[in-house]
């Protein structure tokens, strides 16, 4: 998953989810602007999503 500089978090997660054959349900009144490009990689979807979760701890 690539979180691009100056994109909204929901947009980049949505693009990744669609590429994985999934649909994103963004159930939040807030969104977050990405200030620096972040590349998340893993052996499977769970690895990538776990890395994403680590960003918000």
Image: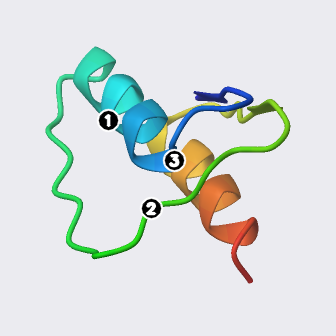
Q: Determine which residue is flagged by label 2.
A: 31
Check contact, mark 1 vs mark 3: CB within 8 A.
no
User: Few, some or many C-alpha atoms within 10 Å of disc 1 (few <14, some 14-19, many ≥20)?
Assistant: some
Residue 7 at x, y = what percent?
A: 57, 33
Q: Is residue 36 above or below residue 56?
A: above
Of tags 2 and 1, the one toward the viewer is 2
Q: Secondary structure at mark 1?
A: helix
Q: Residue at x 63, y 31 (%)?
A: 43
Tell me how far mark 2 sits from mark 3, CA to CA.
6 Å
The quadrant the N terminus occupies is top right
Q: Secondary structure at mark 2?
A: loop
Q: Determine which residue is flagged by label 3.
A: 9
Q: Number of labelled discs?
A: 3
Q: Determine which residue is flagged by label 1.
A: 14
Could you tell which of marks 2 and 3 lies nearer the N-terminus?
3
The picture quadrant where one finds residue 29 is bottom left
Work out which residue is located at the far bottom of the displayed protein and give it. Answer: 57
User: 24 or 51, which lies in front?
Assistant: 24
Whether residue 19 sits left or right of residue 12 in the image: it is left
Tell me how far mark 2 sits from mark 1, CA to CA.
12 Å
Work out which residue is located at the far right of the displayed protein and give it. Answer: 36
């Amino acid at each position: 998953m690539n979180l691009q500089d100056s994109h909204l978090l929901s947009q980049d997660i949505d693009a990744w989810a669609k590429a994985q054959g999934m649909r994103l349900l963004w159930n939040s009144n807030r969104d977050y602007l990405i200030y620096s490009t972040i590349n998340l990689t893993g052996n499977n979807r769970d690895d990538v999503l776990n890395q994403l979760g680590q960003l918000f701890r």
